Amino acid sequence: MRNSEGETQLSRREAAIAMRAAVRQSAQLALGDGGGPAAPSRYTIIIPLIGGGALVYHTYTQAFARLDAADLAVWDRVEQGEMDVSDPALAPFLSGGFVVSAARDERAEVARQLDRARFDPSSMILTIAPTMGCNFACAYCFQGLDKPTGRMSPETTDALCDYVADKAEGLRHLHVTWYGGEPLMNRPAIYALSDRMIESCRENNCGYSAFIVTNGYFLDLTTAQELFRRGVRTAQVTLDGSANAHDARRHLLSGKPTYQRICDNLGEVVEHTDMHIAIRVNVDTTNGDDVLGLLDDLKAKGFAGRRNFAVYFAPVEAITDACASCDPDSFAKTDYGQWEADLYRAAFERGLCALPQPPVFHGNCGAVRKNGLVVLPDGALHKCWDTVQTPSLAIGNVRDVTAAEASPRSQAWLQWSPFDNPVCSECPILPSCAGACAFKFVHREQTHGEAGGLPCPSWKFNLAERLFLRAEKMGVVSPDDWDPVLSPTRADAALKTGARHTFASMDAAGAPALLPAE
């Protein structure tokens, strides 16, 4: 068995599979099984290669290795129920989590780990919109062109800061996401709120970190330095193609272009600060062909190989009524999955992103956490930022957070679990996505089309391709090892990653009953 975290050839009977130390300490899925029949882990993904070998990946422990013919012979015996976990030949398989005791309830263990993260009383995620106003007129924006102009009032600011001051007494860490609208249209509120929340955290020995979602138009060097001084370590900025394509989709309300100013800003920020810039590229059928042009342009502008700059890709999805008009332009999920795999290869080869590493519990966002809130400028509280354009879906107001958290709408988010859904519960990549987007379950009546209505993430459709890229660039496989028939995620009309959600499966699972407006 060859460990794909490096190029060293290791004995398949002596080597423990390398995995992230933190995951190894928390997972406890593979070790301590004692004796008894062995079985393949439900979270093991096998990717056959030319010549009879395979890559093997565990979606929870994140162990990743190459199997040779002898390893696969052992694997076949496990599948046939012929081996005991005490057999020394299984040591590397056990240490990676690929094989477990047949009596082990992995699903229950993963569920407990997810719940521990979701309901951890010592950490909190706040998403704060200091304004819902925006200077852009993006065609797919949930706000449309009728942008609000209101900013967070002093009364709302005081109520929010009082809440954080009280909450910080029992917290180990507070994470804040600045969101909008365009949050940098109200920079004074970001600075003032940050200073007050950071002081409350300092007084209570509570850690603090922050992140901002911004269009980048106002993210000049001075602004970035002010944000960084207030704990903002990462900024997500959207570029939807090279200049012409981006400016056709993401221009000012006046119609004027934005691409060059954003790139100029980012160049200064990346060069002169330690702030990490995460470039989100929204992809649909109208700009897909131009994304390679964007990657070439970013490389030409000197962003390649920067430790604090990386791109990632996201499909345009008509998740809510407010953005239903973009549904006809959305990729089908299978088509987007293949397209995205190719884009990550192109981005990595240009020095614009790291090798792909599947996430763990990616869907464990603030919406499904007990200590997770979205705060709007008027003080309205939501659990998810996909509901902010629908006032009737608010859970309450920051002036009475206790009542908001006890409301039926808030409880609907906390009571939801991917383990209650038959498709999610049986899925081998459940530890990666954690059900993906809970909004698509909790407020299914608000979603549109395949892209917006079905929750399976892109990893569902391109896991093998992205893992092969990782192994290839680490020198563990060569391009010639890819079997065009057996290696793809979607091979023989089936998914290696298990059954995908369909409209029928979502209907069969049952959408929550509509709750009355509060």
Image (cartoon, rainbow, N blue to C red):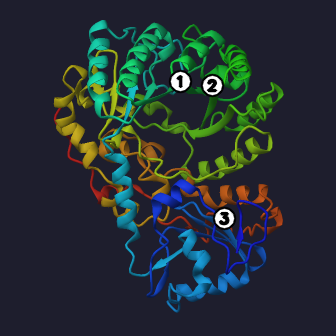
Which amino acid type is marked by label 1? Val
Instruction: Quarter of the image for the N terminus: give it.
Output: bottom right
Q: Position of residue 2 (x, y in %)?
A: 72, 71
Residue 78, placed above or below residue 128: below
Please tell me whether residue 161 is drawn above or below residue 242 in the rendered image.
above
Q: Which residue is mark 2?
A: 275
Q: What residue does disc 1 label?
A: 232
Query: Marks 1 and 2: in contact by CB < 8 Å?
Result: yes
Image quadrant assignment for residue 52: bottom right
Q: Position of residue 409 (x, y in %)?
A: 22, 37
- Secondary structure beneath dot 2 equals loop
Instruction: Name the residue tied to disc 3.
Output: 488
Depth check: give the residue in front, 194 or 502.
194
In this rendering, is residue 518 above or below 371? above
Residue 312 falls left or right of residue 186 = right
Give whichever of discs 2 and 1 has the lower sequence position.
1
Q: Is residue 66 above or below residue 375?
A: below
Q: Quadrant of residue 228?
A: top right
List the single residue furthest toward the bottom: 82
Whether residue 236 is visible here, answered yes or no, is yes
Circle 3 Cα neighbour tier, 10 Å, few/some/many (<14 / 14–19 / ≥20): many
- N-terminal-most mark, 3 or 1: 1
